[in-house]
Each structure stands twice: as structure tokens, then as C-alpha cells.
Image (cartoon, rainbow, N blue to C red):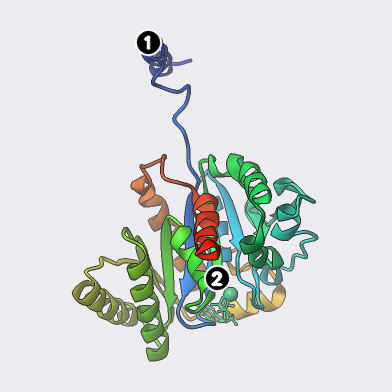
Amino acid sequence: MNIIGDQAAKLRQIVTENGGVLEESTPHRLRSIAITSGKGGVGKTNIATNLAIALAVKSNKKIYILDADLGLANIDVILGITPKFNLGHMLRGEKELEEIIVQGPMGINIIPGTSGVSELANLSDEAREDFLKKLAVLEEEDGILIIDTGAGINNNVLDFVLSADEVIVVTTPEPTAITDAYALIKIISGEKESTNINLIVNMIRKEEEFELVTRGILLVAKQFLGLDIKKLGYIYYDDVVSKAVLSQDAFYILYPDSLATKCIENIALHLLDKKDEIKDVKRPTFFKRLLGSIRRKVGS
Ligand SMILES: Nc1ncnc2c1ncn2[C@@H]1O[C@H](COP(=O)(O)OP(=O)(O)OP(=O)(O)O)[C@@H](O)[C@H]1O
Ligand SMILES: [Mg+2]
């Protein structure tokens, strides 16, 4: 052990002897980031998948990706993976978390949601407790959970979005996508006191488009909702995205030198840069909040 490590160990010992306040190691907490949009087809699933891979490459954290979209074009389709089991098997007590997780490129861990997502609302108290117990280890990890949601403003999507620590709203420069993004931001801000909303503009053709779109949304959100939205980044329109979808592999892996890959890399670095945002380890973790919010609605 080096000198600093040695001193740290001593300090821990002293503090523990004087009242046992400090734990052996600092508690960790999984950072949860939901990717969502007002309008469909703006690139959420492609961004979620490639961003997860970029985060795995650029950090030493364990990266999870939860497929919470009930629609088509899911992560497994994009990556050419056929999961045998999903969240539903875990909810029914048939499988453990490790058994439903599928390994993706660069060691990312895919949690297939599919039918399990809709079963969350109908759990008995016992099944709920059991589910949370099984997820406790995951939620204490020093990792990142990316949640790919469906589009639009429905309860299913909102539960996932409101339960995450951070939200990434994806839009394109299209006027309809922008209006829908703003409508979604308005709903999120009305439902949650402390919102951490970040914006990605996908499929831009030139950088000015990013400035134009973000300036508009940021201004209106500040003026009418009193909300500070952060610019997270942009991704150029790039043919490699659809080519990679056809090849059923990530563009980050197939086209490492492409514009789309560079953009995703920038976004990953930006996210890793603001790693200190989750300071409150006592705040309920993602799955606890998710089940809590579903239970309140069912009970009310
Ligand atoms: N930067 C990009 N450049 C070119 N094409 C893109 C880009 N991003 C996404 N696409 C294309 O847009 C389409 C929709 O992408 P994707 O499925 O990721 O969107 P989504 O928001 O997840 O859709 P849904 O709302 O249906 O879940 C795909 O055909 C994809 O190839
Ligand atoms: Mg999708």
C-alpha cells in the first residue's frame, strides 16, 4: 500500500473507532440516465446503444442499458442480439438478473425490458420486494444505467423519465420534433421539482443548426418554465447510422472514424465530465423510484 493509501486506511480506522461513522469504502450509487423524445424516430435507440458503448470505452465504469421501449427497432435488433429472457422473467421470479442480461459490444450489459416493462404495474407486494432485492447490488454499483424509452408523452415513458437521475431529450432540427421536445420538457418540469434535463440535437447538417435549435428551446424553457436546460451535444446526419442498423452492429464499432462516432464520443466525454452531479447517495435509486411511482398511480 502506498503512503496515501496507508493514511487513508488509518483515518478510516480512527473514524470508525470514534463512533463508526465512516464505512470501509465510500458507498456508490448507479447513475441513471433516461433517453427520451417528444417525437418518435429521432434516433434515441441508436444514440442510447452507441453512447453506452462509448461510455464503456472511455471510462472504467460498468455500463448497463435498459431497453424500456415496447415498440420496434429496439437495442437487440440494432445489435443483432436475440435475448432469451427479459425483465418479465425476473419479475416472475423465474430468472436472476445475471441470467437476463446480455453482453453487448465492449462489455456493455443489456437488460432486455420488452414485455416485463408493462408487468411492473401489476406486481404483488412480495414480488415487488423480491425484485428490488435482486436489483440492490446493481443499484449500488459505480456504474451508469442508460434507459432507452419510447417516444411521446404517455405514462409508461414518463415513469422511466421521472425516475432517472438525468434526462436526455433528443430532437432533430425539424420544427415538429422541436415543438414535441418542448411539450415533453414542459410536462417533465411540471411533474418533478428538481429536473436535470439535457438536450441532444440529432441529424444536424451544419453546426449552426445545433446553436439555433438549442438557443430556441433553452430560451423558451428559461422564460416560461424557469428551467435551465443543458446543451449536451449534437450528432451530424450520417449515412453510417442506417448502414450500421442494416448490418445489425453499432456504428461506433463499424465506423470508428465517422462523424457520427466522433459526435457520440464528445457526448460521452461531456457526460463523464459532469460525473459529480450525483452527490446524494441517500436519494432513492432508479428502480426504487420507478416502482414507487407506479405504485402511487395504481393505488390512487
Ligand atoms: N445521426 C443520424 N444520421 C442518419 N440517420 C440517423 C441518425 N440517427 C438516427 N438515424 C436513423 O433514424 C431512424 C430512427 O432511429 P432510431 O430507431 O434510433 O430512433 P428512435 O427515436 O429510437 O425511434 P422510436 O421513437 O421509434 O423508438 C433509423 O433508421 C436511423 O438509422
Ligand atoms: Mg427507439
In the rendered structure, which amino acid carries the disc numbered 2? Answer: Asn
Look at the numbered disc 1 and give the secondary structure of its residue.
helix
Question: Nearer the N terminus, badge 2 or badge 1?
Answer: 1
Q: Residue at x 53, y 44 (%)?
A: 61
Return the residue at label 1: 14
Q: Residue at x 48, y 69 (%)?
A: 158
Q: Is residue 206 left or right of residue 245?
A: left
Asked whether mark 1 lies closer than 8 Å to ligand 2, one says no
* 96 relative to 82, above or below: above
Percent x, y for residue 6? 42, 13
| Kind of residue at badge 1 | Ile
Please rate how many residues cluster around mark 2, counting C-alpha atoms within 10 Å: few if below 14, some from 14 to 19, many from 20. Answer: some
Q: Which residue is mark 2?
A: 156
The secondary structure type at the circle numbered 2 is helix
Query: Would residue 205 be seen by someone viewing this image from the given angle?
Result: no
x and y percentages locating residue 2 in the rendered image: 44, 16
Could you give the CA–CA distance between mark 2 and mark 1, rounded to whole angstroms? 48 Å
